[in-house]
Amino acid sequence: MLKPLKMEGMSIFVLVWLGQLVSLLGSSISNFALDVWVYQQSASITQLSFLILFTTLPLVVISPFAGILVDNWNRRWVMIISDSGAAFSTLTIAILLFTGQIQIWHIYLVNALSSSFRAFQYPAYSAATTLLVTKKHLGRASGMNQLAQALGQLLAPILGGVLLVIIQLPGIFILDLSSFLFAITTLLLVRFPHHKVTQSLQTHKTSPLTQALQSFHYLRVRSGLLALLLFFASSNFLVGIVQVLTYPLILSFASPAQLGTIMSVGGVGMIAGSLIMSIWGSGRQKYINILFCFMLLQGFSMMVAGLYRSILLFAIAAFLFFLGLPFINSCARVIFQKKVAPDVQGRVFSLNNAICDSCLPLAYLIAGPLADRIFNPLMTVNGSLAGSVGQVIGTGPGRGIGLMFIILGILTMLMTIIAYQYAPLRLVEDELPDVIY
């Protein structure tokens, strides 16, 4: 058995973060390769949509209840079990592939299983961070977590494409399993501090459903935090539509190689934002004001991306959009970490995750029909808006999606301005006391 290292605080967090970074890179490469394989086997965008749906729904359904267990269990062991479960899911697909028995519906079910384990991973990791890192360095820690996600987004398509040719899908699964083993080993080498129970929620002799409802009540009586959650969920819905339509919009005027270049520029922006947040995120700045500023930038970049058929313009918009993501996500996370009692963070973070993710399936379902049946026909050469809006942004392939980007960007900025007028949200850091010092 591995002997625990004599480490504490930020040192433990850095080691755990390194393990999770390696695991995230392995999983991102594996997921990219699997998406490519599914599309090559089925030649169907619908199959990919189902893959996304089976990956998202378990998070929405399980997360509120997963958080209850996270708050009552040792968070380090929750992370170990979650990583082990995800590794088992990857191993299952690998075995099916090696034996020649794999079918696409197998991948749906295994992805749903892996997603179920990830429903425990996020709240456990977020709540554990509060135990390991002082309030001063929460922003820095959150920036490091965003950096890990940015590296996954930037490197997964590049490495995944190369490794598919060199070691193919079986080799990629072996690499992913090795990354899980590394992450689990780092967790076995450390110990987490025990969280103090403040009885913020009464959990004794109550059902899981009642405890989940109590989590919502915990936020409801803290109106600033509830408003932040609903603001984030609304933003997630708009971003979900953008996520589905980005590739079709770029490919309407650019080649697949240029698409890869544009997305790489976005990845560089996300890494830059993550690095800045990691270095600078330990000050006394108002996180809510930073969040609002970068939400306005996100809306502006959406609007710019839809204006013209320009690779350079879209690359600049992608850089700005992804530059702001680490600041937005990190600031929101730090606010919740500072204002939610440690003994209930697991269930509150899980509830947040469930509500925000629940908006994504709806966004995925309506994005395609809105583009294909409404906006693209409006922006054809002879479309209803060709003589008005078409004179500004052009007509033809992709211009309907371009108009959708402009509208979504404007809606994001308007939503941010309206949210800023709500005093409990704007003053959430002043009106709610910190629970960690």
Image (spheres, grey):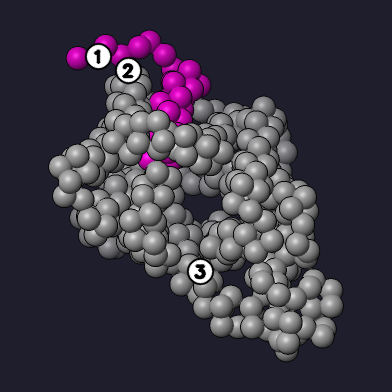
The reply to whether discs 1 and 2 touch (Cβ–Cβ < 8 Å) is yes
Disc sitting over residue 138 in the figure: none
> Going from the N terminus, do you reach mark 2 or mark 3 first?
2
Front: mark 2 or 3: 3
> Going from the N terminus, do you reach mark 1 or mark 2 first?
1
Q: Quadrant of residue 297?
A: bottom right
Residue 215 visible in rendering? no
Q: Which residue is mark 3?
A: 363
Residue 190 visible in rendering? yes
Q: Mostly what secondary structure, the magenta segment?
A: helix
Q: Looking at the rendering, in which quadrant would you find the N terminus?
A: top left
| Vertical side of 426 occupied by 307: above or below | below
Q: Position of residue 336 (x, y in %)?
A: 53, 47
Q: Secondary structure at mark 1?
A: loop
Classify mark 3: residues with Cα within 10 Å, few (<14), some (14-19) or many (20+): some
Q: Position of residue 364 (x, y in %)?
A: 48, 67
Q: Which residues are magenta?
A: 1-30
Q: Secondary structure at mark 2?
A: loop
Q: CA distance from mark 1 to mark 2?
A: 6 Å
Q: Which residue is mark 2?
A: 189
